[in-house]
Amino acid sequence: MINIHYSTEVRAAKDAGQPIVALESTIITHGMPYPQNVEVAAQVEQDIRDAGAVPATMAVLDGVLHVGLEPDRLQSLGQAQGVAKLSRADMAACLATGGTGATTVAATMIAAQYAGIEVFATGGIGGVHQGAETSFDISADLHELGQTPVTVVAAGAKAILDLAKTLEVLETLGVPVIAHGQDQFPAFWSAKSPYAAPLRMDSAEAIAKAHATRRALGLPGGQLVANPIPAADQIPAEELAPIIAEAQADADTHRITGKAVTPYLLQRIFEKTQGRSLTANIALVRNNARLAANIAKALANST
Ligand code: PSU
Ligand code: MN
């Protein structure tokens, strides 16, 4: 029923039972400017191969769900204008109407589960936006984590979000939030935030075992692994706070709403930091890709 296309390497990895790591494509179309977006996507795929797993970048192209993007397709998606941003609400409609769209964390989790992939690496998840008490802007990524059994490795939630409310919603939805190698929940561009993570694990093996245990219990939903940005690459939270506040004020002035909010804020912060936010973003995604590959390998060895 679903038109699905596996890249040659993902097809071979599935047949051989090799570890596979899912990757999203909204970070390519809406999260980073061209040409860095395509370079980073290819680099992150290579990082996963170098760590001994196979990358599966997800996207919907002309109504076909792609699990693993061949280099020419990655290149054209990275340059395309007006690509849809697909979340849980839009995925089926895009497939049904022959559309083209990039997958967010939520849509990538849906695609990964459909393709039998249990581990996914990204930059940061969507969460509860600042001012959500009036805007009601809460990312569908959080609900997806509550119902789709995929372990998502991210550098915490972007500091443009309300981290305290994001952690509360994750707790309400029963999502394990596991900080990797530290006690604090990381804040995307910064390794630390003022908030303690509910759980801490120091190895890929422990995270894989927790994933397998949830599966054995028959629990729906995934795990959020919060992997701090390497210290050398971070931007201190104090330095970013006023920039984020300005970007948020710009978004309010221009009445940016819905799906446009996250891409708008990321672009404004990129401009206001003269591109430093992008450099940090690249470092943290690569770091997450390596940890996700190790989790996928540990999971493949244990099953
Ligand atoms: N992280 C980034 N850049 C991004 C995103 C995350 O560094 O563009 C995307 C992810 O695809 C995430 C989405 O799922 O933003 C969240 O969007 P929203 O807040 O509209 O749910
Ligand atoms: Mn939103």
Image: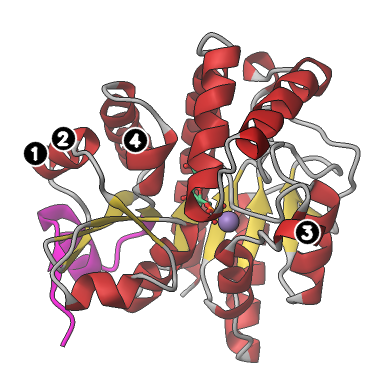
Label 3 beta carbon less than 8 Å to ligand 2: no
Question: Between disc 2 and disc 3, whose residue precedes?
Answer: 2
Q: Tag on residue 50?
A: 4
Position of residue 249 measured from the top left corner of the image (x, y, whole percent) = 71, 31
Q: Nearer the observer, disc 4 or disc 1?
A: 1
Residue 7 is one of the magenta-drawn residues: yes
User: At label 4, which amino acid type do we have?
Assistant: Asp
**Residue at mark 1:** 72
Mark 2 crowdedness (10 Å alpha carbons): few <14, some 14-19, many ≥20: some
Question: Between disc 4 and disc 2, whose residue precedes?
Answer: 4
Q: Is residue 134 visible?
A: yes
Q: Nearer the observer, disc 3 or disc 4?
A: 3
Asked if labels 2 and 1 touch by Cβ distance under 8 angstroms, the answer is yes
Q: Residue at x 75, y 39 (%)?
A: 186
Distance of label 4 from label 1 (alpha carbons): 21 Å
Distance of label 4 from label 2 (alpha carbons): 21 Å
Q: Residue at x 37, y 68 (%)?
A: 112
Please report the bounds of the magenta region as a residue range. 1-21
Asked if labels 2 and 4 touch by Cβ distance under 8 angstroms, the answer is no
The image quadrant that residue 252 belongs to is top right
Q: Residue at x 57, y 66 (%)?
A: 140
Distance of label 2 from label 3 (alpha carbons): 39 Å
Which of these two is toward me, 134 or 18?
A: 134
Residue 41 is one of the magenta-drawn residues: no
User: Against 58, is 236 above or below?
Assistant: above
Distance of label 1 from label 3 (alpha carbons): 43 Å
Question: Between disc 4 and disc 1, whose residue precedes?
Answer: 4
